[in-house]
Amino acid sequence: MQNIDLSKIKKVYFIGIGGIGISALAKLAKSRGMEVSGVNDDEGKTLDSLREAGIEVFMKADLPAFAEATADAYVYSDAWLNRGPEILESAKATGKPVLSYAEALGVFAEGYKTIAISGTHGKTTTTAMVADILIDAGLDPTVIVGSFVKKFGSNFRKGNSEYLVVEADEYNRHMLHLHPYIGGITNIEADHLDYYKDLAEIKSAFDKFLEQSEIKVSDYKKYLDKVPKLSIPGEHNRQNAALAMAIAEILGIDEEITKKSLMNFEGTWRRLEKRGITEAGTIIYDDYAHHPTEVRASIEALRELYPIGEKKITILFQPHLYSRTKALFNDFTKCFHGADKIILLPIYFAREDKDESVSSQKLAEAICENDDKAIAFPDFELAEEYLRGQIFGKDDILVTMGAGEAYKIVDKVFHFS
């Protein structure tokens, strides 16, 4: 990674600025007095919050040429290696530093006492829990998290203390760009097999992350019995809270403050988020789950609230990445137990090229072989038409699920926004 002196960086241009993590970093740069702008390829909630922070955002379709050649540094989202390679090449041609989001996060984190949460599942929720606890304890942290936290209504919070709480993504070994004061790992499972060879290689990457951490937290079993009653359901969230409690104890935070903070924790955007109720009484949820373990955990959490026989659950799921769907195909065929119907959207390819060997149609057929009811649609328009023809009432729960954009269909059909 390049050596960057942030004191000499006055202007930063973010490529793919709408990403949930990179948009938070853009806000951090803005809060530190830098001139910030960027490009994105579609509108969304993150862009609204960027503009509110005074950050100028260009749409890729409107860029006649590379417009920001005078920036002192460029930061790009990994997805834009495919989405906007020509913009990346133009940035590199300026001779100025060009950093990935993970590299830039590592640079900005220098000088803080960083608390970094990594792991296969639960990073976002645990990071938000830790942030809430530190805020309630008066430690005034700066926070970067991969969702909008209800406590402060953003994916970024500017603090005035030495603490920085961040979500540390394991994809492409991104978390290794951080050298945290406290490094926490939620759990480890096979994922991102488009990058990692196998589970052993994933474990070795997390071992390295812990080696780079001053204080390591990966065993938090003894805190499980101390977790108070949470307002968000699911055993996975109780485990997230246990890790947050372990970190709070290391920081010397009074246990009563920690417990009260966890009891009041309201969750984050797109993490089994209850969006509202339709005129007919159907409860709408949105959830970011995109790994079989996460899907299973979310359905189990919903069934804690709405037991089988009490409510019917329909899942509108968009698989995320051809590589993940293919590598974990058998697990995906079994993870929807507890739902009454599964509607599959086309695979969200993000940073990948199309792989004809795997599809949502093939996944739907395999799910049906396991006695679950699934149907697949080749595009959003047909899925939207299908949903409009269904009768959803007060006995129904409809959940949009996945790391893609399934929620947009519900926005159109039920006029949510």
Image: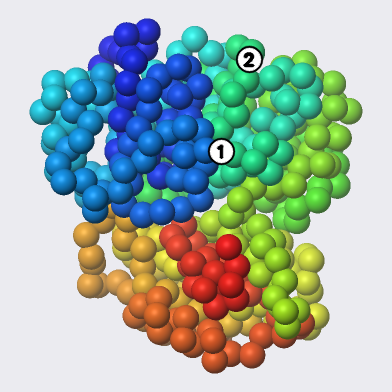
Which of the pair 17/124 is nearer the observer? 17
User: Which element is circle 1 on?
Assistant: strand
Where residue 182 appears, as percent x and y from the top left, is: 59, 20
Which of the pair 209/20 is nearer the observer? 20
Figure check: 112 above or below 229? above
**Is residue 77 at all visible to an observer of this figure?**
no
Q: Is residue 379 left or right of residue 64?
A: right
Question: In which quarter of the view is residue 325 placed?
Answer: bottom left
Where residue 417 appears, as percent x and y from the top left, is: 58, 63
The residue tagged 1 is: 155
* Quarter the N terminus occupies: top left
Q: Which residue type carries mark 2?
A: Asn
The residue tagged 2 is: 160
Q: Residues within 10 Å of mark 1 (few under 14, many from 20)?
A: many
Checking the image for residue 7, the label placed there is none
Q: Which residue type carries mark 1?
A: Asn
Figure check: 12 above or below 377? above
Where residue 322 appears, as percent x and y from the top left, is: 32, 63
User: Which element is circle 2 on?
Assistant: loop
Residue at horizontal 65%, vertical 65%? Answer: 285
Query: Going from the N terminus, do you reach mark 2 or mark 1 first?
Result: 1
Where residue 255 appears, as percent x and y from the top left, is: 85, 26
Residue at horizontal 13%, vertical 24%? Answer: 94
Question: In which quarter of the view is residue 394 placed?
Answer: bottom right
